[in-house]
Amino acid sequence: MGKLALTQGVVALLGRTAMAQGRVVSIGYQKYGTLILLKEKGFLEEALKPKGVSVQWAQFPAGPPLLQALIGGTLDFGGTGDLPPVFAQASSPDALVYAGNETPTGSSEAIIVPDTSPIRTVRDLRGKRVAVTRGSDAHWLLLASLKNNGLSFKDIEVSYLLPAAARPAFEAGKVDAWSIWDPYLSGVSTPVRSLATGSDCGGGTQFYLARKGFFTDNLDLLHDVIAAVTRCDAWAQANKPDVVKILARSTGLDPAVVARSVEKIEFGFHYITPQVIAQQQHIADTFAAEGLLPSTPKVSDAAPKI
């Protein structure tokens, strides 16, 4: 997939740059990952200041509400896991554009049970209560893992909970298992055992999404945002001890817990490829077949054209 056609229409880009003076670029982020590092390091503000463009940051607890804000027009750019864009495109087909993705880190999400649980495999989840955030990448992990083991959502009792509610429910034994991502995965305070990870189902990819109007009308600013993300990823990969400090502060987690999570990550921005789009389409088709989407999105429609 081409580099977002960032070199097309030079004259038009210059015109949009002039229009951008005094503008605000709104970025949605979660308290873990490259975007919060970008916020803390100030690379984007440094890049946009000469254009007279300021940056507004908004934190979200998960990908689905972040993309709702993006679709609603209050954000220009944000980052989520693999499933939220599928749900967003199914409900608002022409609202978002895939701007890129991070190097997949499948081990950053898992279906977990207490270490003392008699549940040993995904097949043992039949009839059990499982917590997951609706529309999150962990939602895909759960469905894919069930299907890989001859089960479906009809075979379990699903509790749709945001992480802040799911964690106490899990630790109190009100649910039998939890499908969850980092940093919440690394922050569980009780000993746990993993039944499956994102590596088992092609999951664990973090995506960058742009509002369609932002992509269409401010391609030069999107280029600046991507360049700042790329710069931040290079810094993060070379400075993981500093990354741990920032993420421990943002999450309130023990630095040792964060360090174990960060060690799994290979920071790096990638432009969208046909292979990535094919995987996203597979996710979309699988959820649609389960009757969990209002329509089956054509993921390539939300990808930058060559």
Image: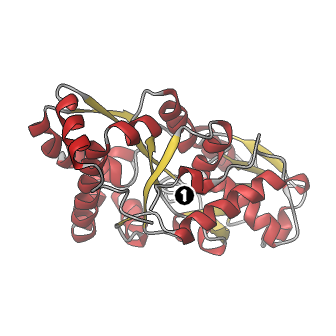
Write the residue at 67% across / 37% down: 91
Eyeballing the image, is 62 above or below 271? above
Write the residue at 54% across / 67% down: 276
Direction from residue 173 to residue 23 in the image, left or right: left
* Residue 295 seen in render: yes
Name the foreground residue: 280 vs 203. 280
Residue 88: image x %, image y %?
A: 61, 41
Direction from residue 236 to residue 174 in the image, left or right: right
Helix, strand or loop at label 1? It is loop
* Residue 112 seen in render: no
Residue 37: image x %, image y %?
A: 28, 51
Name the foreground residue: 265 vs 206. 206
Q: Quadrant of residue 216?
A: top left
**Residue position marked by numbered label 1 in the rendering:** 185
Q: Quadrant of the C terminus?
A: bottom left
Direction from residue 4 to residue 207 in the image, left or right: right
Name the foreground residue: 29 vs 239. 29
Write the residue at 50% across / 39% down: 61
Residue 109: image x %, image y %?
A: 57, 62
Residue 231: image x %, image y %?
A: 22, 60
Eyeballing the image, is 132 above or below 218? below
Eyeballing the image, is 17 above or below 153? above
Residue type marked 1:
Leu
Q: Quadrant of residue 59?
A: top left
